Structures are given as structure tokens and as C-alpha cells.
Image (spheres, rainbow, N blue to C red):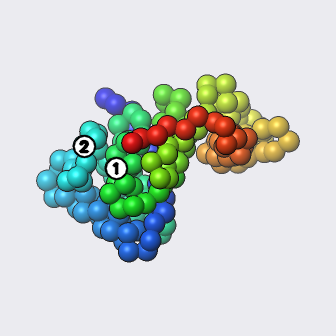
Amino acid sequence: MPNWCANSVVFFAAEDRLGMIRDLFTDIQQKQEVDGRYHLPDFAVSEGFMRDIVLEPGCITFTTRSSPNISLLAEIADHYDAAFVNRYMEIGDGLYGEARYDFYMLTITDLDQEELRAAICYDPQKRDYPYGEQVFEYEGDLLDHILDQKIAQKSDTDIYQRLR
């Protein structure tokens, strides 16, 4: 049985394009609810799927099998002339990161095993996660903080992956 990767994606585009993207995800989820099979956009060449799609204000969440489906998100972004930021996690496999995509440029930042181990330092007596000078009530908040720090430290000279 596969582990499920939780994804949260925010698309950036003109308002009409954002509406089309939301309609696409709504359509995919509705088709899956009707026939119980996984669906992808007609224009997609990437494999994989998204399930348990939830449209929230400004954000779309879904699960994928084991790892994020970044190539599919890039295809959707290209099709609708959009950019995106995708946060994903599958803690069982040590996967926690963010993918940013804009104008065919993909930047991926993942937490490594050492960073993840540092985050899993729960203090049962205080019921929190100490990290440096800060204390976090929830593991997810701590992981977001560590990832945000890592992203902020990246420079313009980091390696970007061009998808076209």
C-alpha cells in the first residue's frame, strides 16, 4: 500500500485563468466521485493522479501517491499561463518541501533527513517542539518554519530546473 503525499498548491495568474484552474480541479474531483477512477486533464502527458481534492479560498489541496506530482502541476500552469507554489509532505518517507514554478523555471527546496530529525524533537513534559530559541506547539508549524528559513537562505545562484 503506498504512502500518500499531502499537497497544497497556490496558483498565480489572471483572475479568469485562476477560475479555469479551479474549474479544472472541480471537474477532476467530480469525475472521480462519479466513477471511482482517477482522472487527469485531457491535455496532460504526465502520469499519476490527484485524489481527495479540496478547493479552499486561494488554495487547492489534494493527495498523491508517495511524492508530489510536480510535472502535472507544471503542465496545468503552462496550459493556463500561470505560476504556482506547491507545499508537500510525506513524513513517513522523509519528504517535506516546496516547489515553485514560474515561466518554465522550477525551484525545489526539500528538507533533508537531518533537518527533519531536528524537527522531531518533541518535549512531552512541555508538550511542544523546541527549535533553537523558538518553541512550536505543532510539528507542522516547526517544519514550515525550517523550510521557510531554508528558502530564505537560498540565493539567485541556486540551481533551477528548466522544464522546457
Q: Which residue is drawn at 78% across and 39% down?
A: 130
- Residue 121 located left or right of residue 84: right
Image coordinates of residue 149 in percent, x first then y, are 72, 43
23, above or below 47, in the image = below
> Visible in this render: residue 91?
no
Q: Residue at x 43, y 60 (%)?
A: 82
- Residue 4 located left or right of residue 41: right
Mark carried by residue 75: 1
Image coordinates of residue 37 in percent, x first then y, are 17, 47
Cβ atoms under marks 2 and 1 closer than 8 Å:
yes
Mark carried by residue 100: none
Q: What residue type is labelled 2?
A: Val
- Residue 124 located left or right of residue 113: right
Give neighbour class at mark 1: few <14, some 14-19, many 20+ (Cα, 10 Å).
some
The residue beneath circle 2 is: 45
> Visible in this render: residue 2?
yes
Q: Which amino acid does label 1 sit on?
A: Glu
Question: In the picture, which quadrant includes the N terminus?
Answer: top left
Q: Nearer the viewer, residue 47 or 7?
A: 47
Element type at mark 1: helix
13, above or below 126, in the image = below
